[in-house]
Image: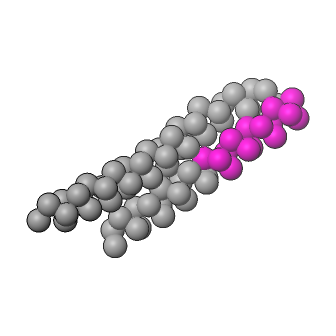
Amino acid sequence: MWMAIREFVGWLITLVGLALIGVVLVLALNRNVFEAMALSLPAAIVFRAGIGLVRMTAAARIASSLSQREV
């Protein structure tokens, strides 16, 4: 149960990061370079955090399935 919630939150954070990257792209195309530069680092951090959470949940699922097979 907790893994499903953690995976959902990870995907949600990943989608927020992608939305922020889209905002950065729109700002850059509208020649608001300084605003795009200021938002690019937080957008990348949020995206990477979401991907990290999804990866951690996948690893936990694999580890729990392997421990159940051995017992």
Above or below for 49 versus 58: above
The quarter of the rendered structure image containing the C terminus is bottom left
The residue most toward the bottom is 1
The residue range painted magenta reads 17-31
Chosen colour scheme: one colour
> Residue 3 placed where, x, y %?
35, 64
Above or below for 11 versus 43: below
Query: Looking at the image, which residue is at 49% across and 46% down?
Result: 51
> Residue 7 placed where, x, y %?
44, 61
- Looking at the picture, tell me which residue is in the foreground, 2 or 67: 67
* Label total for image: 0
> Residue 63 placed where, x, y %?
25, 55
Query: Looking at the image, which residue is at 40% across and 61% down?
Result: 6
Residue 2 drawn in magenta: no
Quadrant of res 25: top right
> Residue 56 placed where, x, y %?
36, 50
Residue 19 drawn in magenta: yes
Quadrant of res 40: top right
- Looking at the picture, tell me which residue is in the foreground, 27 or 7: 7
User: What secondary structure is the stretch in magenta mostly built from?
Assistant: helix
